[in-house]
Image (cartoon, rainbow, N blue to C red):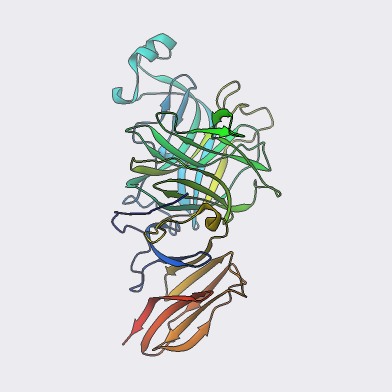
Amino acid sequence: MHASLALPFVLFFTLSFVNGQEPFVFALLENKIVKGNAVLIDDFTGNTINQELWYNYYPWGGLSLDAKTYTDPSMTVQKSGLLELWVDTVSQWRNFPDWMMNQEQVERLQRQREDKKLEIKRLTSALWSKQTFKYGYFECRCWLPRGQGYWPAFWLYGGKPNEEIDIIEAKGERDKSYHVDVHCPNRCDRVRKWGVFDQPFGHWVKTKEKITETWITLAGLWTPEGVFFYYNDKLVAWHEAPFVTEMNLIANFSLAMDNGPFSPGPDRRTIFPQQYKIDYIRAWSIPGLNAVETASLRSLAWVRCVPEMHHRIRFEFANLNLEKQRVWIEKDGSPFIELDITAPNQMVDYSYWGPGTYNLRVKSNNEVQESLLVKKP
């Protein structure tokens, strides 16, 4: 596979220009280092959803008449540094605007009372990006609840034409697997098994450890040639098909139905209300990943730089090798701090640093790249 990333988006993120710094990322391949920048970073600090970045509902409404389900904005909550997406069972009759309803379906299902209220049995939740994206690396650190019928997801969607990249669709009763998928016209979601059998790409990714009730990171790298799926920074699946539509980034918590998609639905042991928790959602543009072979992406390593409040920078490392790679900070061209790449992350407080120019330098095999961190007068 040859992937070429041309990423024409505008920088747009919550932690942008914190103390004058911008988030960035280095992708380390076998013989190449490429730099990318953040186009959306939300660590969900504070107790209010960022209305510049997100809708806390589906823009088309989120009302499902056949399932008696409504995606209620009040079920999406931000507090204590986390986003909480909730589901619950209810017994309510509610009024909804005409634009949210298919009147033919209302009459066919006989769901409406004389006062024009509709019966709702289940409440679900969603977070939908106001910005659209075309290509990049999209990641989410999340906590999945355990219980039959829960259906949390993290995905990209473009409606014209109907294109979709499902980075994760989980089921609460499946402790050691989750579903990845793509949807697109002209059967581009099909693959050949053993070169003979034509079947949909979508399948269950198996994990050695439990994925429910623990923190995990899911990500998708979308290129003009296809999509690569990552679980805890490890490549677990890929599909070589072009997606041309700009897409919104979505996290949602739904409930399956018996005999419906992702059956079974909840049973008597399923706990309500329940939450699907998200620590952060990020989107990165990486325009330097050109003509990268699939085999190289299997060993892709990362150095992520995310500025935080109070003159702090968090560095995150994934798949780095002490024998081949090194990361350090230089002050005015001289070594200043060696970063510990054996740890998953390291926080640096630069409030005490003296005047000077500080650069992050990354070495992989014989190549070295750098990026400005801090310039203090």
Quadrant assignment, res 44: bottom left
Q: Residue furthest front?
A: 195
Task: Note whether 227 is above or below 335 in the view shown.
Answer: above
Taking the spot 61% from the left edge, 36% from the top edge, the residue there is 171
Tell me if I can see residue 282 in this picture: yes
Residue 41 versus residue 253 in the image, above or below: below
Badge count: 0
Locate residue 306 relative to residue 146 in the image: left or right.
Answer: left
Q: What's the residue at 35%, 64% (across, down)?
A: 16
Residue 36 lies in what quarter of the image? bottom left
Residue at 50%, 80% in the rendered image: 328
Q: Is residue 177 above or below residue 363?
A: above
Report x, y in % for residue 145: 61, 43
Asked if residue 269 lies left or right of residue 286, the reply is right
Q: Nearer the viewer, residue 241 or 102?
A: 241
> Residue 292 or 11: which is nearer the viewer?
292
Residue drawn where x is 59% and y is 64% of the image: 319
In x, y percent, where is residue 238?
53, 45
In this picture, residue 188 sits left or right of residue 377: right
Q: Position of residue 164 (x, y in %)?
A: 43, 37
Q: Nearer the viewer, residue 147 or 183?
A: 183
* Image location (x, y in percent) of residue 271: 64, 36
Q: Is residue 40 above or below residue 328?
A: above
The quadrant of the image that shows the C terminus is: bottom left
